Image: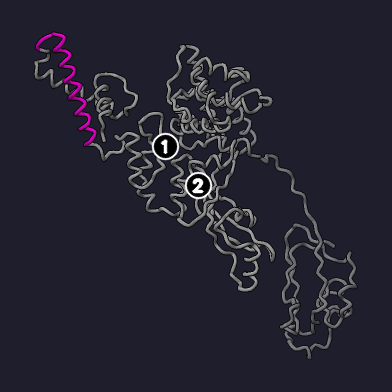
Protein backbone atom coordinates (compact mmCIF):
# COMPACT_ATOMS: atom_id res chain seq x y z
CA UNK A 1 0.00 0.00 0.00
CA UNK A 2 2.78 2.45 0.95
CA UNK A 3 5.69 3.06 -1.41
CA UNK A 4 9.01 4.82 -0.88
CA UNK A 5 7.46 7.96 -2.33
CA UNK A 6 4.63 7.74 0.18
CA UNK A 7 7.13 7.40 3.01
CA UNK A 8 9.00 10.49 1.82
CA UNK A 9 5.75 12.47 1.62
CA UNK A 10 4.83 11.43 5.16
CA UNK A 11 8.32 12.32 6.40
CA UNK A 12 8.03 15.76 4.78
CA UNK A 13 4.58 16.31 6.27
CA UNK A 14 5.83 15.33 9.74
CA UNK A 15 8.65 17.86 9.44
CA UNK A 16 6.11 20.61 8.80
CA UNK A 17 6.28 20.90 5.02
CA UNK A 18 3.15 21.23 2.89
CA UNK A 19 2.66 18.14 0.73
CA UNK A 20 -0.01 18.51 -1.93
CA UNK A 21 -0.26 14.80 -2.72
CA UNK A 22 -1.27 13.65 0.75
CA UNK A 23 -4.75 13.12 2.01
CA UNK A 24 -6.02 15.13 4.94
CA UNK A 25 -6.33 11.98 7.05
CA UNK A 26 -2.72 10.95 6.45
CA UNK A 27 -1.46 14.48 7.05
CA UNK A 28 -3.31 14.61 10.37
CA UNK A 29 -1.88 11.23 11.39
CA UNK A 30 1.67 12.41 10.60
CA UNK A 31 1.31 15.58 12.66
CA UNK A 32 -0.32 13.66 15.51
CA UNK A 33 2.50 11.09 15.53
CA UNK A 34 5.10 13.88 15.54
CA UNK A 35 3.41 15.56 18.53
CA UNK A 36 3.30 12.29 20.50
CA UNK A 37 6.96 11.54 19.72
CA UNK A 38 7.95 15.01 20.92
CA UNK A 39 6.09 14.48 24.19
CA UNK A 40 7.93 11.17 24.64
CA UNK A 41 11.35 12.77 24.02
CA UNK A 42 10.58 15.58 26.44
CA UNK A 43 9.49 13.08 29.06
CA UNK A 44 12.66 10.97 28.69
CA UNK A 45 15.03 13.94 28.75
CA UNK A 46 13.24 15.82 31.49
CA UNK A 47 11.66 18.41 29.28
CA UNK A 48 14.89 19.82 27.86
CA UNK A 49 17.53 18.51 25.43
CA UNK A 50 20.88 17.51 27.00
CA UNK A 51 22.69 20.02 24.85
CA UNK A 52 21.88 22.98 22.65
CA UNK A 53 24.39 22.10 19.98
CA UNK A 54 23.09 22.33 16.42
CA UNK A 55 24.07 18.78 15.54
CA UNK A 56 22.09 17.40 18.46
CA UNK A 57 19.05 19.53 17.65
CA UNK A 58 19.10 18.38 14.03
CA UNK A 59 19.53 14.74 15.07
CA UNK A 60 16.69 15.06 17.55
CA UNK A 61 14.42 16.57 14.89
CA UNK A 62 15.36 13.84 12.42
CA UNK A 63 14.58 11.10 14.94
CA UNK A 64 11.24 12.70 15.73
CA UNK A 65 10.29 12.89 12.03
CA UNK A 66 11.58 9.38 11.33
CA UNK A 67 9.61 7.88 14.18
CA UNK A 68 6.50 9.89 13.26
CA UNK A 69 6.64 8.65 9.64
CA UNK A 70 6.86 4.99 10.68
CA UNK A 71 4.15 5.46 13.29
CA UNK A 72 1.90 7.10 10.69
CA UNK A 73 2.27 4.13 8.34
CA UNK A 74 1.52 1.75 11.20
CA UNK A 75 -1.54 3.73 12.30
CA UNK A 76 -2.85 4.03 8.75
CA UNK A 77 -2.41 0.29 8.17
CA UNK A 78 -4.35 -0.51 11.31
CA UNK A 79 -7.27 1.54 9.95
CA UNK A 80 -7.22 -0.04 6.50
CA UNK A 81 -10.77 -1.36 6.95
CA UNK A 82 -12.06 2.20 7.38
CA UNK A 83 -12.60 3.50 3.83
CA UNK A 84 -12.74 7.09 5.09
CA UNK A 85 -9.02 6.91 5.86
CA UNK A 86 -8.05 5.76 2.36
CA UNK A 87 -6.75 7.95 -0.41
CA UNK A 88 -8.63 8.32 -3.66
CA UNK A 89 -6.29 5.95 -5.61
CA UNK A 90 -6.58 3.34 -2.85
CA UNK A 91 -10.36 3.61 -2.95
CA UNK A 92 -10.31 3.16 -6.73
CA UNK A 93 -8.28 0.00 -6.21
CA UNK A 94 -10.98 -1.33 -3.89
CA UNK A 95 -13.63 -0.59 -6.52
CA UNK A 96 -11.59 -2.50 -9.11
CA UNK A 97 -11.34 -5.46 -6.75
CA UNK A 98 -15.14 -5.66 -6.99
CA UNK A 99 -14.95 -5.64 -10.79
CA UNK A 100 -16.16 -2.04 -11.12
CA UNK A 101 -13.67 0.03 -13.13
CA UNK A 102 -15.55 3.31 -13.47
CA UNK A 103 -15.07 4.93 -10.05
CA UNK A 104 -12.26 7.18 -11.30
CA UNK A 105 -14.88 9.60 -12.62
CA UNK A 106 -15.78 10.46 -9.03
CA UNK A 107 -12.89 12.49 -7.69
CA UNK A 108 -11.87 15.85 -6.37
CA UNK A 109 -8.88 18.05 -7.21
CA UNK A 110 -6.54 16.03 -4.95
CA UNK A 111 -6.16 12.56 -3.45
CA UNK A 112 -8.80 13.13 -0.79
CA UNK A 113 -11.82 10.95 -1.67
CA UNK A 114 -15.07 12.84 -1.89
CA UNK A 115 -17.85 11.87 0.53
CA UNK A 116 -20.07 10.85 -2.36
CA UNK A 117 -17.52 8.29 -3.51
CA UNK A 118 -17.11 6.85 -0.02
CA UNK A 119 -20.88 6.41 0.30
CA UNK A 120 -20.97 4.81 -3.14
CA UNK A 121 -18.41 2.21 -2.11
CA UNK A 122 -20.26 1.44 1.12
CA UNK A 123 -23.43 0.91 -0.95
CA UNK A 124 -21.71 -1.13 -3.65
CA UNK A 125 -22.50 -4.49 -2.06
CA UNK A 126 -26.21 -3.63 -1.89
CA UNK A 127 -26.13 -2.51 -5.51
CA UNK A 128 -24.52 -5.79 -6.52
CA UNK A 129 -27.46 -7.64 -4.97
CA UNK A 130 -29.80 -5.76 -7.34
CA UNK A 131 -27.48 -5.76 -10.35
CA UNK A 132 -29.50 -6.21 -13.53
CA UNK A 133 -32.61 -4.47 -12.19
CA UNK A 134 -33.92 -1.03 -13.20
CA UNK A 135 -33.79 0.16 -9.59
CA UNK A 136 -30.05 -0.55 -9.43
CA UNK A 137 -29.50 1.77 -12.42
CA UNK A 138 -31.55 4.51 -10.75
CA UNK A 139 -29.59 4.25 -7.51
CA UNK A 140 -26.11 4.11 -9.03
CA UNK A 141 -26.77 7.15 -11.23
CA UNK A 142 -27.59 9.16 -8.11
CA UNK A 143 -23.89 9.00 -7.23
CA UNK A 144 -22.99 10.37 -10.66
CA UNK A 145 -25.16 13.45 -10.33
CA UNK A 146 -28.21 12.20 -12.26
CA UNK A 147 -30.81 12.44 -9.51
CA UNK A 148 -33.90 12.87 -11.68
CA UNK A 149 -34.45 10.07 -14.17
CA UNK A 150 -36.82 7.33 -15.27
CA UNK A 151 -36.17 3.82 -16.58
CA UNK A 152 -38.46 2.57 -19.37
CA UNK A 153 -39.19 -0.86 -20.77
CA UNK A 154 -40.55 -1.04 -24.33
CA UNK A 155 -43.28 -3.17 -25.88
CA UNK A 156 -43.86 -3.63 -29.59
CA UNK A 157 -47.54 -3.33 -30.44
CA UNK A 158 -49.91 -2.76 -33.33
CA UNK A 159 -50.76 0.84 -34.07
CA UNK A 160 -53.15 -0.31 -36.78
CA UNK A 161 -53.38 -3.24 -39.16
CA UNK A 162 -50.47 -1.96 -41.26
CA UNK A 163 -47.98 -0.46 -38.80
CA UNK A 164 -46.14 -1.17 -35.55
CA UNK A 165 -44.97 1.10 -32.75
CA UNK A 166 -42.79 0.83 -29.65
CA UNK A 167 -44.44 1.99 -26.44
CA UNK A 168 -42.29 2.65 -23.39
CA UNK A 169 -43.60 2.43 -19.84
CA UNK A 170 -41.69 3.74 -16.81
CA UNK A 171 -40.80 0.88 -14.46
CA UNK A 172 -38.46 2.73 -12.08
CA UNK A 173 -37.40 6.30 -11.47
CA UNK A 174 -37.58 9.38 -9.31
CA UNK A 175 -40.10 11.61 -11.12
CA UNK A 176 -43.83 11.77 -10.46
CA UNK A 177 -46.26 10.20 -12.95
CA UNK A 178 -43.94 9.91 -15.95
CA UNK A 179 -45.78 9.68 -19.25
CA UNK A 180 -45.51 6.78 -21.68
CA UNK A 181 -43.23 7.14 -24.69
CA UNK A 182 -44.25 6.23 -28.26
CA UNK A 183 -41.72 5.63 -31.05
CA UNK A 184 -42.14 4.55 -34.64
CA UNK A 185 -40.83 1.11 -35.52
CA UNK A 186 -37.86 2.34 -37.57
CA UNK A 187 -36.84 4.84 -34.89
CA UNK A 188 -35.51 2.09 -32.64
CA UNK A 189 -34.62 -0.68 -35.05
CA UNK A 190 -32.65 1.27 -37.65
CA UNK A 191 -28.97 0.65 -37.12
CA UNK A 192 -29.53 -2.16 -34.61
CA UNK A 193 -27.66 -5.22 -35.96
CA UNK A 194 -29.31 -7.50 -33.39
CA UNK A 195 -32.87 -6.75 -34.51
CA UNK A 196 -33.55 -9.24 -37.31
CA UNK A 197 -37.21 -8.74 -38.28
CA UNK A 198 -38.59 -6.03 -40.52
CA UNK A 199 -41.90 -4.40 -39.77
CA UNK A 200 -43.63 -6.26 -42.62
CA UNK A 201 -42.31 -9.62 -41.45
CA UNK A 202 -43.76 -9.09 -37.98
CA UNK A 203 -47.09 -7.98 -39.45
CA UNK A 204 -47.21 -11.14 -41.57
CA UNK A 205 -46.46 -13.31 -38.52
CA UNK A 206 -49.25 -11.56 -36.67
CA UNK A 207 -51.72 -12.31 -39.47
CA UNK A 208 -50.65 -15.94 -39.96
CA UNK A 209 -49.78 -17.14 -36.46
CA UNK A 210 -51.42 -14.52 -34.22
CA UNK A 211 -48.26 -13.92 -32.16
CA UNK A 212 -50.20 -12.09 -29.46
CA UNK A 213 -48.89 -8.56 -29.69
CA UNK A 214 -48.00 -6.49 -27.69
CA UNK A 215 -44.74 -8.19 -26.83
CA UNK A 216 -41.91 -7.07 -24.54
CA UNK A 217 -38.68 -6.09 -26.31
CA UNK A 218 -35.07 -6.10 -25.02
CA UNK A 219 -34.88 -2.30 -25.24
CA UNK A 220 -34.30 -0.49 -21.94
CA UNK A 221 -34.61 3.29 -21.92
CA UNK A 222 -32.85 5.68 -19.55
CA UNK A 223 -34.31 9.20 -19.53
CA UNK A 224 -32.59 11.79 -17.32
CA UNK A 225 -34.49 14.95 -16.48
CA UNK A 226 -32.39 18.10 -16.66
CA UNK A 227 -33.90 20.76 -14.43
CA UNK A 228 -32.15 24.10 -14.82
CA UNK A 229 -34.25 26.25 -12.53
CA UNK A 230 -32.85 25.23 -9.16
CA UNK A 231 -30.91 27.27 -6.61
CA UNK A 232 -27.48 25.98 -7.66
CA UNK A 233 -27.00 28.41 -10.56
CA UNK A 234 -27.74 31.45 -8.40
CA UNK A 235 -25.37 30.19 -5.69
CA UNK A 236 -22.65 29.43 -8.24
CA UNK A 237 -22.82 32.91 -9.77
CA UNK A 238 -22.71 34.49 -6.30
CA UNK A 239 -19.56 32.53 -5.42
CA UNK A 240 -17.91 33.64 -8.66
CA UNK A 241 -18.87 37.28 -8.02
CA UNK A 242 -17.48 37.08 -4.47
CA UNK A 243 -14.23 35.48 -5.64
CA UNK A 244 -13.68 38.22 -8.19
CA UNK A 245 -14.31 40.88 -5.54
CA UNK A 246 -11.85 39.09 -3.24
CA UNK A 247 -9.26 39.18 -6.03
CA UNK A 248 -9.81 42.93 -6.53
CA UNK A 249 -9.58 43.66 -2.81
CA UNK A 250 -6.55 41.50 -2.01
CA UNK A 251 -4.77 40.95 -5.30
CA UNK A 252 -4.67 37.22 -4.53
CA UNK A 253 -6.28 34.48 -6.58
CA UNK A 254 -8.83 32.50 -4.52
CA UNK A 255 -8.15 28.93 -3.41
CA UNK A 256 -7.44 26.55 -6.27
CA UNK A 257 -9.86 23.64 -5.81
CA UNK A 258 -11.31 23.12 -9.30
CA UNK A 259 -9.64 20.55 -11.53
CA UNK A 260 -9.38 21.17 -15.28
CA UNK A 261 -9.20 17.61 -16.55
CA UNK A 262 -8.17 18.44 -20.13
CA UNK A 263 -5.11 20.45 -19.11
CA UNK A 264 -4.34 18.68 -15.84
CA UNK A 265 -4.29 21.83 -13.72
CA UNK A 266 -6.10 22.80 -10.54
CA UNK A 267 -7.41 26.36 -10.63
CA UNK A 268 -9.88 28.45 -8.68
CA UNK A 269 -13.60 28.45 -9.37
CA UNK A 270 -13.25 32.00 -10.71
CA UNK A 271 -10.67 30.93 -13.31
CA UNK A 272 -12.71 27.91 -14.38
CA UNK A 273 -15.83 30.02 -14.78
CA UNK A 274 -14.00 32.70 -16.76
CA UNK A 275 -12.52 30.07 -19.06
CA UNK A 276 -15.98 28.69 -19.85
CA UNK A 277 -17.35 32.15 -20.64
CA UNK A 278 -14.25 32.88 -22.72
CA UNK A 279 -14.61 29.72 -24.84
CA UNK A 280 -18.37 30.23 -25.11
CA UNK A 281 -17.97 33.75 -26.48
CA UNK A 282 -15.57 32.45 -29.11
CA UNK A 283 -18.33 30.29 -30.57
CA UNK A 284 -21.65 31.99 -29.92
CA UNK A 285 -23.20 35.41 -30.04
CA UNK A 286 -25.19 36.68 -27.09
CA UNK A 287 -28.46 38.51 -27.64
CA UNK A 288 -30.00 41.32 -25.67
CA UNK A 289 -29.65 40.95 -21.92
CA UNK A 290 -32.28 41.89 -19.38
CA UNK A 291 -32.12 44.35 -16.52
CA UNK A 292 -30.93 41.75 -14.01
CA UNK A 293 -29.14 38.40 -13.84
CA UNK A 294 -29.56 35.30 -11.69
CA UNK A 295 -27.38 35.64 -8.60
CA UNK A 296 -28.10 34.91 -4.96
CA UNK A 297 -28.09 38.26 -3.16
CA UNK A 298 -28.79 37.18 0.41
CA UNK A 299 -26.57 36.76 3.44
CA UNK A 300 -26.55 32.96 3.92
CA UNK A 301 -24.07 32.11 1.18
CA UNK A 302 -21.76 30.38 3.68
CA UNK A 303 -24.46 27.82 4.52
CA UNK A 304 -25.49 26.36 1.18
CA UNK A 305 -28.30 24.24 2.61
CA UNK A 306 -29.96 27.35 4.06
CA UNK A 307 -29.86 29.05 0.66
CA UNK A 308 -31.44 26.03 -1.03
CA UNK A 309 -34.17 25.89 1.64
CA UNK A 310 -34.80 29.60 1.19
CA UNK A 311 -35.02 29.19 -2.59
CA UNK A 312 -37.50 26.32 -2.33
CA UNK A 313 -39.64 28.33 0.07
CA UNK A 314 -39.70 31.39 -2.17
CA UNK A 315 -40.41 29.43 -5.35
CA UNK A 316 -42.99 27.06 -3.86
CA UNK A 317 -46.38 26.95 -5.54
CA UNK A 318 -48.49 29.99 -4.58
CA UNK A 319 -52.17 29.61 -3.77
CA UNK A 320 -53.56 33.09 -4.44
CA UNK A 321 -52.63 35.90 -6.79
CA UNK A 322 -51.42 38.20 -4.01
CA UNK A 323 -48.98 35.48 -2.92
CA UNK A 324 -47.54 35.34 -6.44
CA UNK A 325 -46.78 39.05 -6.38
CA UNK A 326 -45.26 38.83 -2.90
CA UNK A 327 -43.05 35.85 -3.77
CA UNK A 328 -41.93 37.41 -7.04
CA UNK A 329 -40.80 40.50 -5.15
CA UNK A 330 -38.90 38.31 -2.68
CA UNK A 331 -37.34 36.28 -5.49
CA UNK A 332 -36.11 39.29 -7.46
CA UNK A 333 -34.79 40.86 -4.28
CA UNK A 334 -32.97 37.78 -2.98
CA UNK A 335 -31.97 35.77 -6.05
CA UNK A 336 -31.19 38.36 -8.72
CA UNK A 337 -28.92 41.36 -9.09
CA UNK A 338 -29.08 44.34 -11.38
CA UNK A 339 -26.78 44.04 -14.38
CA UNK A 340 -24.44 46.93 -13.42
CA UNK A 341 -23.31 44.83 -10.42
CA UNK A 342 -22.01 42.06 -12.69
CA UNK A 343 -18.25 42.30 -13.24
CA UNK A 344 -18.69 40.86 -16.75
CA UNK A 345 -20.14 43.76 -18.70
CA UNK A 346 -18.65 43.35 -22.17
CA UNK A 347 -18.10 40.40 -24.47
CA UNK A 348 -14.32 40.60 -24.10
CA UNK A 349 -14.24 40.94 -20.29
CA UNK A 350 -13.85 37.21 -19.60
CA UNK A 351 -10.86 36.97 -21.94
CA UNK A 352 -9.28 40.10 -20.47
CA UNK A 353 -9.70 39.10 -16.81
CA UNK A 354 -8.54 35.53 -17.42
CA UNK A 355 -5.42 36.80 -19.19
CA UNK A 356 -4.60 39.04 -16.22
CA UNK A 357 -5.39 36.54 -13.45
CA UNK A 358 -3.76 33.46 -15.00
CA UNK A 359 -2.13 34.04 -18.41
CA UNK A 360 -0.47 30.61 -18.35
CA UNK A 361 -3.80 28.88 -17.99
CA UNK A 362 -5.32 30.96 -20.78
CA UNK A 363 -2.43 30.09 -23.09
CA UNK A 364 -2.92 26.40 -22.32
CA UNK A 365 -6.57 26.70 -23.31
CA UNK A 366 -5.67 28.45 -26.55
CA UNK A 367 -3.15 25.75 -27.45
CA UNK A 368 -5.47 22.82 -26.69
CA UNK A 369 -5.88 20.31 -29.52
CA UNK A 370 -9.61 20.01 -28.84
CA UNK A 371 -12.17 21.96 -30.80
CA UNK A 372 -13.85 24.83 -28.99
CA UNK A 373 -17.03 22.77 -28.57
CA UNK A 374 -15.14 19.79 -27.16
CA UNK A 375 -13.11 22.01 -24.86
CA UNK A 376 -16.15 23.83 -23.55
CA UNK A 377 -17.97 20.58 -22.87
CA UNK A 378 -14.94 19.31 -20.95
CA UNK A 379 -14.78 22.53 -18.93
CA UNK A 380 -18.50 22.41 -18.18
CA UNK A 381 -18.13 18.83 -17.02
CA UNK A 382 -15.38 19.99 -14.66
CA UNK A 383 -17.61 22.80 -13.42
CA UNK A 384 -20.48 20.38 -12.80
CA UNK A 385 -18.14 18.11 -10.85
CA UNK A 386 -17.06 21.08 -8.71
CA UNK A 387 -20.67 22.04 -8.04
CA UNK A 388 -21.65 18.49 -7.08
CA UNK A 389 -18.72 18.23 -4.67
CA UNK A 390 -19.08 21.66 -3.09
CA UNK A 391 -22.77 22.56 -3.46
CA UNK A 392 -24.82 19.42 -4.04
CA UNK A 393 -24.60 16.31 -6.13
CA UNK A 394 -27.97 16.88 -7.84
CA UNK A 395 -26.57 19.48 -10.22
CA UNK A 396 -26.77 18.32 -13.85
CA UNK A 397 -23.95 18.98 -16.30
CA UNK A 398 -25.00 22.01 -18.35
CA UNK A 399 -23.24 20.43 -21.31
CA UNK A 400 -26.21 18.08 -21.53
CA UNK A 401 -28.41 21.04 -22.42
CA UNK A 402 -26.03 22.53 -24.96
CA UNK A 403 -24.49 19.49 -26.63
CA UNK A 404 -27.12 16.79 -26.31
CA UNK A 405 -27.39 13.38 -24.80
CA UNK A 406 -24.49 11.64 -26.53
CA UNK A 407 -21.96 13.95 -24.91
CA UNK A 408 -23.74 13.78 -21.59
CA UNK A 409 -23.61 9.98 -21.47
CA UNK A 410 -20.12 9.64 -22.85
CA UNK A 411 -18.82 8.68 -19.41
CA UNK A 412 -22.02 7.29 -17.90
CA UNK A 413 -22.87 4.74 -20.58
CA UNK A 414 -20.30 2.19 -19.29
CA UNK A 415 -21.70 2.62 -15.77
CA UNK A 416 -25.25 1.95 -16.98
CA UNK A 417 -24.14 -1.03 -19.07
CA UNK A 418 -22.45 -2.50 -16.00
CA UNK A 419 -25.65 -2.50 -13.94
CA UNK A 420 -28.30 -3.07 -16.62
CA UNK A 421 -29.68 -6.53 -17.50
CA UNK A 422 -27.07 -8.42 -19.51
CA UNK A 423 -29.02 -8.80 -22.76
CA UNK A 424 -30.93 -5.53 -22.57
CA UNK A 425 -30.12 -2.96 -25.25
CA UNK A 426 -29.73 0.56 -23.94
CA UNK A 427 -31.72 3.52 -25.26
CA UNK A 428 -30.66 6.99 -24.15
CA UNK A 429 -33.53 9.45 -23.97
CA UNK A 430 -33.66 13.02 -22.73
CA UNK A 431 -36.04 15.46 -21.09
CA UNK A 432 -35.26 19.13 -20.46
CA UNK A 433 -37.47 20.55 -17.75
CA UNK A 434 -37.94 24.18 -16.77
CA UNK A 435 -40.55 23.85 -14.10
CA UNK A 436 -40.38 26.56 -11.47
CA UNK A 437 -43.68 26.51 -9.52
CA UNK A 438 -43.51 30.24 -8.85
CA UNK A 439 -43.34 31.18 -12.53
CA UNK A 440 -45.51 28.37 -13.91
CA UNK A 441 -48.51 28.67 -11.60
CA UNK A 442 -51.72 30.18 -12.95
CA UNK A 443 -54.17 31.28 -10.28
CA UNK A 444 -57.84 31.59 -11.26
CA UNK A 445 -58.63 34.04 -8.52
CA UNK A 446 -61.83 35.48 -9.98
CA UNK A 447 -65.06 33.54 -9.51
CA UNK A 448 -67.09 34.12 -12.68
CA UNK A 449 -70.78 33.24 -12.72
CA UNK A 450 -71.22 29.85 -14.33
CA UNK A 451 -73.71 30.25 -17.22
CA UNK A 452 -76.92 28.26 -17.04
CA UNK A 453 -76.87 25.63 -19.74
CA UNK A 454 -80.13 24.59 -21.40
CA UNK A 455 -80.37 21.77 -23.90
CA UNK A 456 -83.23 19.69 -25.33
CA UNK A 457 -83.47 15.89 -25.16
CA UNK A 458 -85.59 14.29 -27.89
CA UNK A 459 -86.65 10.70 -27.28
CA UNK A 460 -89.21 9.68 -29.85
CA UNK A 461 -87.62 6.96 -32.01
CA UNK A 462 -89.65 3.99 -30.75
CA UNK A 463 -90.42 2.31 -34.06
CA UNK A 464 -89.50 -1.16 -32.77
CA UNK A 465 -91.50 -0.85 -29.57
CA UNK A 466 -94.68 -2.66 -28.43
CA UNK A 467 -98.11 -1.29 -27.55
CA UNK A 468 -99.29 -0.67 -24.03
CA UNK A 469 -102.38 -2.49 -22.80
CA UNK A 470 -105.38 -1.85 -20.56
CA UNK A 471 -104.09 -3.98 -17.68
CA UNK A 472 -100.54 -3.35 -16.53
CA UNK A 473 -100.05 -6.95 -15.42
CA UNK A 474 -100.82 -8.58 -18.78
CA UNK A 475 -97.75 -10.15 -20.39
CA UNK A 476 -99.32 -11.69 -23.50
CA UNK A 477 -99.79 -9.87 -26.81
CA UNK A 478 -102.98 -11.89 -27.39
CA UNK A 479 -104.66 -10.13 -24.47
CA UNK A 480 -103.61 -6.72 -25.70
CA UNK A 481 -106.62 -5.60 -27.73
CA UNK A 482 -106.44 -1.86 -27.29
CA UNK A 483 -103.38 0.30 -27.91
CA UNK A 484 -103.30 3.15 -25.47
CA UNK A 485 -101.44 5.65 -27.60
CA UNK A 486 -104.84 6.75 -28.88
CA UNK A 487 -105.41 10.32 -27.79
CA UNK A 488 -109.14 9.72 -27.30
CA UNK A 489 -108.57 7.05 -24.70
CA UNK A 490 -106.78 9.52 -22.43
CA UNK A 491 -105.76 6.77 -20.01
CA UNK A 492 -102.05 7.57 -20.08
CA UNK A 493 -100.27 10.44 -21.80
CA UNK A 494 -101.71 11.69 -25.03
CA UNK A 495 -100.01 10.75 -28.23
CA UNK A 496 -98.84 14.30 -29.00
CA UNK A 497 -97.21 14.48 -25.56
CA UNK A 498 -95.46 11.11 -25.14
CA UNK A 499 -95.59 7.94 -27.21
CA UNK A 500 -95.68 5.00 -24.85
CA UNK A 501 -94.91 2.53 -27.65
CA UNK A 502 -95.66 2.28 -31.36
CA UNK A 503 -95.35 -1.33 -32.46
CA UNK A 504 -98.69 -1.15 -34.37
CA UNK A 505 -98.53 2.56 -35.19
CA UNK A 506 -95.17 3.36 -36.82
CA UNK A 507 -96.45 6.77 -37.83
CA UNK A 508 -96.05 7.87 -34.24
CA UNK A 509 -92.31 7.94 -34.79
CA UNK A 510 -92.39 11.09 -36.89
CA UNK A 511 -95.70 12.85 -36.44
CA UNK A 512 -94.82 14.83 -33.30
CA UNK A 513 -93.91 18.48 -33.69
CA UNK A 514 -90.56 19.67 -32.35
CA UNK A 515 -92.09 22.47 -30.29
CA UNK A 516 -93.92 19.86 -28.21
CA UNK A 517 -90.66 18.17 -27.11
CA UNK A 518 -89.31 18.49 -23.58
CA UNK A 519 -86.14 20.64 -23.21
CA UNK A 520 -84.21 20.14 -19.96
CA UNK A 521 -82.24 22.58 -17.82
CA UNK A 522 -79.67 22.05 -15.06
CA UNK A 523 -82.26 21.95 -12.25
CA UNK A 524 -82.53 18.31 -11.11
CA UNK A 525 -85.92 16.68 -10.61
CA UNK A 526 -87.31 13.21 -11.32
CA UNK A 527 -90.28 12.11 -13.41
CA UNK A 528 -91.07 8.41 -13.82
CA UNK A 529 -92.97 7.11 -16.83
CA UNK A 530 -94.11 3.52 -16.51
CA UNK A 531 -94.73 1.37 -19.55
CA UNK A 532 -95.25 -2.37 -19.05
CA UNK A 533 -94.81 -4.10 -22.40
CA UNK A 534 -96.30 -7.45 -23.23
CA UNK A 535 -93.13 -8.85 -24.81
CA UNK A 536 -90.37 -8.89 -22.18
CA UNK A 537 -87.74 -10.14 -24.63
CA UNK A 538 -87.78 -7.04 -26.81
CA UNK A 539 -84.64 -4.89 -26.76
CA UNK A 540 -86.77 -1.77 -27.00
CA UNK A 541 -88.75 -2.34 -23.81
CA UNK A 542 -88.98 0.68 -21.52
CA UNK A 543 -90.04 -0.70 -18.17
CA UNK A 544 -89.20 2.24 -15.90
CA UNK A 545 -87.62 5.24 -17.54
CA UNK A 546 -86.51 8.14 -15.37
CA UNK A 547 -86.25 11.49 -17.08
CA UNK A 548 -83.79 13.69 -15.18
CA UNK A 549 -84.72 17.35 -15.30
CA UNK A 550 -87.65 19.68 -14.95
CA UNK A 551 -89.99 20.03 -17.91
CA UNK A 552 -90.39 23.41 -19.48
CA UNK A 553 -93.60 23.82 -21.56
**Residue at label 1?**
106
| Lateral position of residue 460 relative to residue 284, left or right | right
User: Who's the residue at 32% across and 23% down the image?
Assistant: 19
Closer to the eye: label 2 or 1: 1
Label located before the other in sequence (2 or 1): 1
Image location (x, y in percent) of residue 161: 69, 66
Q: Which residue is mark 2?
A: 174
Q: Is residue 186 magenta?
A: no
Q: In the rendering, at what x and y percent does residue 473 appear?
A: 72, 85
Q: Main secondary structure of the magenta part?
A: helix
Q: Is residue 53 magenta?
A: yes
In-image side of 84 versus 206 (left or right): left
Q: Nearer the viewer, residue 200 or 472?
A: 200
In the rendered view, would you say 463 is above or below 354?
below
Whether residue 75 is visible here, answered yes or no, is yes
Residue 450 drawn at (x, y percent): 74, 48
Instruction: Pick whichever, 177 or 460, lies toward us.
Output: 177
On the rendered image, what quadrant is the N terminus found in? top left
Seen from the viewer's position, the closer of residues 322 and 472 is 322
What residue span does the magenta drawing correspond to? Answer: 50-77
Residue in the picture at 35% in, 34% down: 88
CA distance separating discs 2 and 1: 22 Å
Task: Tell me whether circle 2 and circle 1 mark residues in contact (CB < 8 Å).
Answer: no
Q: Please identify the quadrant where the C terminus is shown.
A: bottom right
Q: Is residue 256 above or below residue 162?
A: above
Q: Residue furthest bottom?
A: 478
- Horizontal and vertical percent for residue 194? 54, 58
Q: Is residue 309 visible?
A: no
Tell me the SS state at disc 1: loop
Provide the secondary structure element on which disc 2 rests: loop
Q: Which mark is residue 282?
A: none
Amino acid sequence: MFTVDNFWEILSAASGDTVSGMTEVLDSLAKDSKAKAKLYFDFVFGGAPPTEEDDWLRLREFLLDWYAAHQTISSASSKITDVETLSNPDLDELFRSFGFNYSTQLKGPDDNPIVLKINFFLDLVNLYKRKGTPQAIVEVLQYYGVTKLDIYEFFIKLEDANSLIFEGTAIAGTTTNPSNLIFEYDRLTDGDPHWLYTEQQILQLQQINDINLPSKTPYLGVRPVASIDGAEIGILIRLVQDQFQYYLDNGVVPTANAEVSEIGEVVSLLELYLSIVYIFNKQYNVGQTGDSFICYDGTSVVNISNVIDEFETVTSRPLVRSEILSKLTTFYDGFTRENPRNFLQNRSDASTFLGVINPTYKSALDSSTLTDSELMFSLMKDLSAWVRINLGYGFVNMGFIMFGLDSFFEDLKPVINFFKPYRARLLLLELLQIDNPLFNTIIVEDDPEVPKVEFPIYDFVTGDGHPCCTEQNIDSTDSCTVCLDDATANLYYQRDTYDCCSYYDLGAVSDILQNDFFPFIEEIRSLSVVCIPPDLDSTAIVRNEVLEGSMVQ
